[in-house]
Image (cartoon, rainbow, N blue to C red):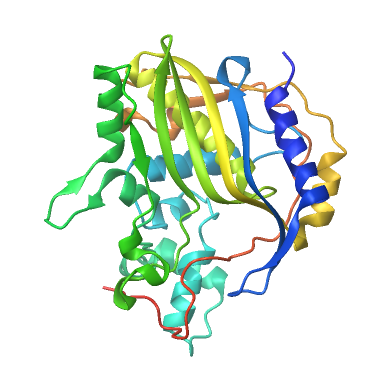
Amino acid sequence: MKNNGERQYLELMADILKNGVRKVDRGTGDASYTVFGRQIRFDLSAGFPLLTTKKVYWKGVLHELYWFLSGQSNIKYLVDNNVHIWDDYPYRKYKILNPRSKIEKEAFIEKIHTDNKFAKKWGNLPRIYGELWRRWPTRTKKTIDQVKWAVEEIKKDPSAHNAIVTSWNPEYLYTMAQYKDTSHFPICHNMYQLNVNDGKLSLQLYQRSADIFLGVPFNIASYALLTLIIAKVTGYEPGDFVHTFGDVHIYELHMEQVREQLKRKPRPLPSIKFTKNIKTIDDFKPEYVSLENYDAYPPIKAPLSVTGGYYGKKKNIFKVK
């Protein structure tokens, strides 16, 4: 089958190159070229949308999604599994709170791996995806498991219009929050909705801010896999993964890499096989998923822009317990 989903992704990237408006992040000074309000769609019966025009870090996709679905917010699980896609944010938090510390990032991450007490204090990123998906805080001591609720809702009522999971909690975000509670981490892929039509389960993601080159390929694979997992545990056939964007952008420091990727022609998509029956969301483990027939071009390396989150005059913006 033709890889139409990846072609949509490449067309969006070309659209940004042609029509993007230059913006500068006020916190980091990093520039990007952005468009607003776009959408791409992947038919999951046509293959698994792991991009082929550059190799995507599949191990990272698997472990990060498990990290989310198991409700974790400490990067120690990822570090212990040699997945380092989240290293920058807790390290930045540590440096802000310890401005005199000379510890480099590599040494900081090694200490997360080897020192449980240090990891408990400095490896935690409170109020991010896993915690908010599975343990949304309320005014009482009760927490809400949004994922479990949404899955049960569509199992009981295929006509449901309300199966939404959100990570956007204004109580902790930006200057909407009280200063002592403000989270420095920017929630980017902030809401998704499940829907069943004709016995097929689809998922639509709304991503308010999207790094098209580094982040979006990862997001596509992660939420497509989430769709397949939820279809598996609910008994529906997989439908579409729909990716809706707010601000979608190319960072100025990624321009050369983007042009290189656009020269490549998409190859046939791989497929996903579950090696063990998954009856509930909590049954999912990374080792129960097999990626088959993934034929991708070599990876294209690019630096991460650690932008977004709280911006204000005070630098000590974290409350560490």
Q: Which residue reaches farthest right?
A: 263
- Quarter that holds the N terminus: top right
Q: Relative to residue 109, is residue 283 depicted above or below? A: above
Instruction: State the image coordinates of residue 31 (x, y, percent, origin top left).
Output: 71, 67
Q: Residue at the spot x=68%, y=23% of the render?
A: 269
Instruction: State the image coordinates of residue 68 (x, y, percent, origin top left).
Output: 39, 44
Instruction: State the image coordinates of residue 76 (x, y, percent, origin top left).
Output: 40, 57
Q: Relative to residue 248, is residue 170 depicted above or below? A: below
Q: Is residue 109 visible?
A: yes
Q: Which of 123 and 132 is in front in this view?
A: 132
Instruction: State the image coordinates of residue 291 (x, y, percent, origin top left).
Output: 58, 25
- Quarter that holds the C terminus: bottom left
Q: Which residue reaches farthest top?
A: 198
Q: Residue at the spot x=40%, y=78% of the render?
A: 317
Give the number of callouts: 0
Q: Is residue 276 visible?
A: no
Q: Residue at the spot x=55%, y=54% of the render?
A: 85
Q: Which of 302 and 30 is in front in this view?
A: 30
Q: Relative to residue 310, is residue 283 depicted above or below? A: above
Q: Residue at the spot x=58%, y=44% of the render?
A: 245
Drawn side of residue 112 relative to residue 211, left or right = left
